[in-house]
Amino acid sequence: MEETRVVVLLSNTSTGQPAKEPTGDTFTGTPPGRGPPPQVAFENGGQVSILDEKTLRLVYCQNASKPHLLMAQSCHFDVLTDKENENELPAVLHGMFVDRRDGFIMHLKVERECHLMFLLDSLVIQLKAKLQRESLRLVGGAVRFRKLLEDDRGGEGGNTLETHFAFNNIHGLMTWLLNQYRMRADLSTGPGHEALEVEYIVSHLEQDLKFNARLYVLLVAMEELSVSSLCGLRCYFSEDLLTSALVPTQVTSFIQDAADQASIKPLYMIVLFHVMAKGSQVDAKNVQLLSLAHLISRRQHSLHQNQMSSTSSLCSQPSQSEMCQQALNDGFKLVHDSLLQYVRQTEQMKHCRQVFDEQLAQYEELLLQIANTELRHMLQASQSSLLQLTSLLEKRS
């Protein structure tokens, strides 16, 4: 599972300031007894108030048929801010060029728009500064772009506008963004979430080192997100991968493919939710954004707590570790004793072989002596017989 950080950017369209914690109970809409009934306030959204730098309170009506029943929920995130956070993207770039792990930026907003400035800052300006700090030089790269279409919108004439572009320097990538991306991100090109995969090939200026770094960018428009994709995102970030696989969408498949390609080290993912508020009010789509952000953040916190619990559990049970260590020691001792016994047997076999060789040599020498003696006797007997035969022949002649 990738490492995920949830960042909520809360923008106020009315005052330019985030919603502050109210001093007392605050409700959206006309007070009871004046004008429309209170269900108008919550049937399409809710009210938010910031509690601290990581928490906000969301008040909303869960059931439009019972507008008097209001739900209050505290939503927790890794970062809650009213301005573009300056620390999150550098963390992604650090992971890419120092820790050598793929990066992923997922940006969610209610309305679809052209994210040219966001991409120029992320893919060009901050990246160039990071390369300079790490003494790295960009020698090449490639960018892949396509639109992810929703299945339930397939009849609206959507087009993926898929393209691939190779660049040799930062200027080439910037030119592609200013021309090709801006043309494809125009609202007139039809619906679709934007997916980019940027691969950088860099070399170190002082070391003989060259490597690739990959960054995925997914720009999601909540107004175009289908129910299947929303459920898929909830299942994926809840690690309910079985349910997520049963109803795959292009959005969840893009995330899953990126996670699968990061085989050595897990992805470092930033999920940025851009929530628009008017005063302290948010509409239904922005409520969905906050709900999804809270779900992902809560799941990541739960995973972290489980890891911490597992670590503390191991530390609190030293007896089990000692038993394992003792079992390993006993196993090593058994192997050591077996080796010693094998060495002793080998030495005994060597000694027996040496004694056998000595006895065999003595036996061969004895046989040789006996053979020489017998041969000498036979020669002497043959000589005597020959002399007798010679003397008999002489007498006859």
Image (spheres, rainbow, N blue to C red):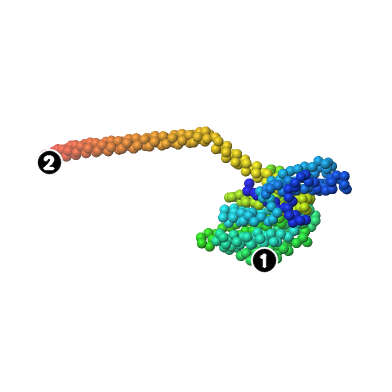
Residue 331 visible? The answer is no
Residue 211 sits in quarter: bottom right
| Three-letter code for the amino acid on which mark 1 is drawn | Thr
Give the total of numbered labels: 2
Give coordinates of residue 86: x percent, y percent: 64, 56
Disc 1 target residue? 175
Residue 177 visible? The answer is yes
Of helix, strand and loop, which one carries label 2? helix
| Three-letter code for the amino acid on which mark 2 is drawn | Glu
Extreme-front residue of the structure: 23
Q: Which mark is residue 160?
A: none
The C terminus - image quarter: top left
Q: In percent of the image, x 50 and y 34: which residue is there? A: 322
Q: In percent of the image, x 23 and y 36: which residue is there? A: 370
Distance, label 2 to label 1, CA atoms, is: 132 Å
Tell me the crowding category of disc 2: few under 14, some 14 to 19, or many 20 or more residues within 10 angstroms, Cα based.
few
Horizontal arrangement in the rendering, residue 96 relative to residue 378 (left or right)? right
* Nearer to me, 145 or 362: 145
* Nearer to me, 271 or 152: 271
Q: In percent of the image, x 66 and y 48: which residue is there? A: 78
Q: Is residue 260 above or below residue 345?
A: below
Of helix, strand and loop, which one carries label 1? helix
Give coordinates of residue 29: x percent, y percent: 83, 48
Disc 2 target residue? 394
Residue 300 sits in quarter: top right
> Closer to the N terminus: mark 2 or mark 1?
1
Extreme-left residue of the structure: 395
Q: In percent of the image, x 57 and y 53: which residue is there? A: 99
Q: Is residue 141 above or below residue 34?
A: below
